[in-house]
Image (tube, rainbow, N blue to C red):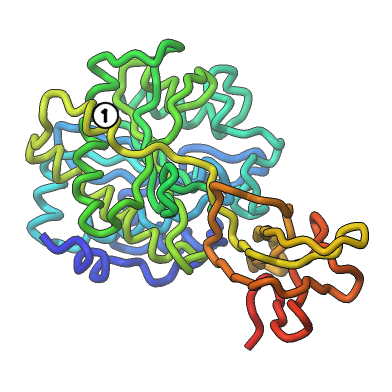
Amino acid sequence: MNLEQLFDQNKEKTIEGRYITLENIEPLLNKESLKNDVKIIGESVLGKPIYSYTKGNGKTKIYLWSQMHGNESTTTKALFDFINLLNNGSDLAKELLNSFTFYCIPMLNPDGAKLYTRANANSIDLNRDSQDLTQPESKILRAIFEDFKPDYCFNLHDQRTIFGVADTGKPATVSFLAPSYNQEREINETRLKAINLIAGINEVLQHYIPGQVGRFDDSFNINCIGDTFQYLGVPTILFEAGHYPDDYEREKTRKFVFMSLLASFIILNENDIVHNRNDKYLNIPQNNVSFFDFMYKNVKINYDGNEIITNFVAQYKEELIGNKINFNAYIIEAGDLKGYYGHYEYDAKGALYKDGQSNIPKENQRADFNFDGKAFFVNGKLKN
């Protein structure tokens, strides 16, 4: 099966980039081919509708939700790509719909999506509200869980560009977690089902992004929704869409999330899961904070009258300006920075740092500077 071809055939071309809001997805949910399977299941803090999409009549029930954090939109795009596949009339679609019943919440946090914030309109992280259930969005997610009684839960997120795969120097383009169900991080039958499935997905992804799949930290926190659902006896898989080289809009990463979703359902449908693949799961390298967006090496700076050679790094801040996400680069720190990598790296080869004010890169300063007055950088990148 050609997963890349299936992605190209089913990609929802009307949504792209990082800023995905309710206004972007409502036209899709109102399409003739979808609207009979769409319901409004509640409202956000600011009264925005929260939609569900349900499709299939199969025995195995799959519960998927995206944009629990409003500024994490990659999996929302991939979810609509997958919904397109379910509606394309192919033999694969028919097989999946006969085997599964899919219950999707494409955007759990529409207020956060509009504001491009992690939290909801009450500044509450919904992924820390699974016990107290103080927010309407959290209550909706839990109520559907109890009513739908899923066999598997798919908790769909994005992660920052700072994550790499262990110490390999490769970005964690997609990461997974079978959340713990207790403080001891033990493995029971429920968690093992999630572990086995992740191991199968990883084997598929290694053909496309070798060495770029990570395993998320499994420290237990009952306030997190994945840990709660695992504790309640439903196999739950955390998806983290991360960075692919030069893909800050996450258009390539969405493809690998789509592939992961489709691969997981094919594996489940074919019952192609070895009884215990915990070793395979643990062999997936753990996520590690090892990247900056920019790294500049062997830079000469003038520190208290002394010239020294050092390195410094810069990071993008994603800033919402006029309904568009702007990636603005700011200097983070200078130093040895051993063990860290840059998605963009530049060797200054001993050239002197200059920014018009000093010869020292300062924290939180815009990344506009030059080396020896010859190589000029604007917003972190070398200007041609």
177 left or right of 47? left
Residue 4 percent coordinates (x, y): 22, 65
Q: Residue at x 40, y 37 (%)?
A: 286
Query: Quarter of the image holding residue 2?
Result: bottom left
Residue 157 appears anywhere in the view: yes
Residue 326 percent coordinates (x, y): 66, 67
Residue 162 appears anywhere in the view: no
Q: Nearer the viewer, residue 49 or 301?
A: 301
Residue 195 percent coordinates (x, y): 26, 29
- Residue type pointed to by label 1: Ile
Q: Nearer the viewer, residue 315 or 15?
A: 315
Tell me the quadrant of the picture where the N terminus can be found.
bottom left
Q: Nearer the viewer, residue 65 or 264?
A: 264
Rendered view: 187 above or below 113? above
Rendered view: 260 above or below 230? below
Q: Which residue carries the number 1 mark?
A: 195
Tell me the quadrant of the picture where the C terminus can be found.
bottom right
Q: Residue at x 61, y 63 (%)?
A: 294
344 left or right of 7? right
368 left or right of 174? right
Q: Residue at x 29, y 25 (%)?
A: 235
Residue 267 percent coordinates (x, y): 14, 41
Q: Nearer the viewer, residue 76 or 342?
A: 342
**Mark 1 residue crowding within 10 angstroms, few (<14) / some (14–19) / many (20+):** many
Query: Quarter of the image holding residue 32?
Result: bottom left
Q: Residue at x 43, y 26 (%)?
A: 218
Query: Quarter of the image holding residue 306?
Result: bottom right
Could you tell me which secondary element the residue under label 1 belongs to? helix
285 left or right of 167? left
Please identify the residue farthest to the bottom as the structure is shown.
384
